[in-house]
Amino acid sequence: MTRSRKKSIWVIVIHFLLDQMGYAIVIPLLPLMFGVASSPFYLLDKNTAAYGMGLMGLFVSAYPLAQFLAAPVIGQYADRIGRRRMLIFSTFGTVISYLILIAGILMGNVWVVIAARFFDGITGGNVSVAQTVLADVSLPKERSKNFGLVMAMAGVGIVLGPTLGGFLATDNFIHVSGPLVAFILILLFYVFDVLLLWVFLTETLEKKSTEKVNWWGAFTMFTKRHDLRGVKGLLTARFLYSFGSNVFTNFIGAYLIARFAMSAGTIGNFYSLVGLGIILTQAIVVRVLAKKFSEEKIFSNSLLATAVIVMLFLLPNADKVIYLLVFPMALTFGLVDANLLAVISNRVKKEQQGSVMGMATSLKALAQTVSPIVAGVIAAGFGLSMDIFLASILMFVTWVLFWKIGKSSSFVSPPLSPS
């Protein structure tokens, strides 16, 4: 691996760490912003207080909804004008969004805060552009390893972010510094990220696309991209798997509390162990398996195992074996996430990487937007057990779809070269 490629990979690794930490710091602050009137973070007034949980849901959904709309467009521009320029532009957009969010907090205006989150989602296509840079500098046989590495670093950010956010929300810290410090710190993360990209990231796009940008790409991705051989089925798999995994991730805690009377502390330990397992998987196990097996084989077997493990949570005595399921589940989740992106990336030409990664990010964002709503309706009507069952079934359906794709010509041809 050349020095330039190594440098680009590590710039993207650090970018993912900073990006996910900035995103995750907000997580423990959300209940304080929308649900705890005595908190210094509380945003609502007497006219909006009754809608606290609904507004929190709107705040959470604003980012993935905007990302669904914008990621394909940003990906297309990354193919036309370059990865570096678009990655810096989109990350700088996040800086602007946090300036707007801080202004909204100072004004005590919840609608400005939600608008800032939506604006952040519009420029949040930096995820797909960063993944495209990684695809550009990785040989086909290295892609699962490199995607695993950045996802492991993103996992570190997801674990550290809420921990730091929780510390910044403590009474002792707020008494000394005030509540805005948390958001200013996030802002500084992204300012540093922009500077890092500006100074150290080199352009990785070798051949610019001449295709006209489709501004309605989020809605026409399956009707206008007939030249993307075999990728439509993989993007469908991406959506179905993201939908199922988001249903499971968002509702497994509530299910374990309702079904087995687990404490909030126990649930927190559960999530921490899962996060740690995914980090270790994507940092180490992915790289080891990539030397012996193809991305397709690893993804297929891991996906089927994930569907089975999720279903095991419905066993009558699942509470007795809950911690025996944690690391196998983290292992399979981590392998699925890293290898699916690698499989998609290896199926398209280099000048199409930005567009396709934008589509993949957009579909994941759509799943993140819709799945909590659907799962909430199902839980209200049929119980939380049905959400876990739905998650397992969606993963199994994804496996069947992928198995059928594997029988088609899309996997018969050799992987595309990086040139």
Image: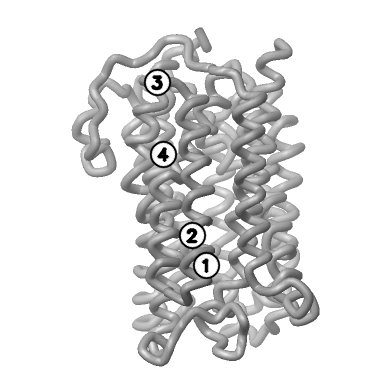
- Callout 4: few (<14), some (14-19), or many (20+) C-alpha neighbours within 10 Å? many
Mark 1 or mark 3, earlier in chain: 3
Mark 4 or mark 1, earlier in chain: 1
- Callout 2: few (<14), some (14-19), or many (20+) C-alpha neighbours within 10 Å? many
Residue type (three-letter) at the residue carrying disc 3: Ile
State the CA–CA distance, disc 1 to disc 2.
6 Å
Q: Tell me the element at label 2.
A: helix
Query: How many numbered discs, if any?
Result: 4
| 155 displayed left or right of 308 | right
Contact (CB < 8 A) between labels 1 and 2? yes
Return the mark for residue 81: 3
Image position of 396 with respect to 198: above or below: below
State the CA–CA distance, disc 4 to disc 1.
21 Å
Mark 3 or mark 2, earlier in chain: 3
Return the mark for residue 360: 4
Residue 56 image point, x, y percent: 45, 74
Return the mark for residue 250: 1
Q: Tell me the element at label 1.
A: helix
Residue type (three-letter) at the residue carrying disc 2: Asn
Q: Residue at x 52, y 56 (%)?
A: 98
Q: Quadrant of the N terminus?
A: top right
Mark 3 or mark 4, earlier in chain: 3
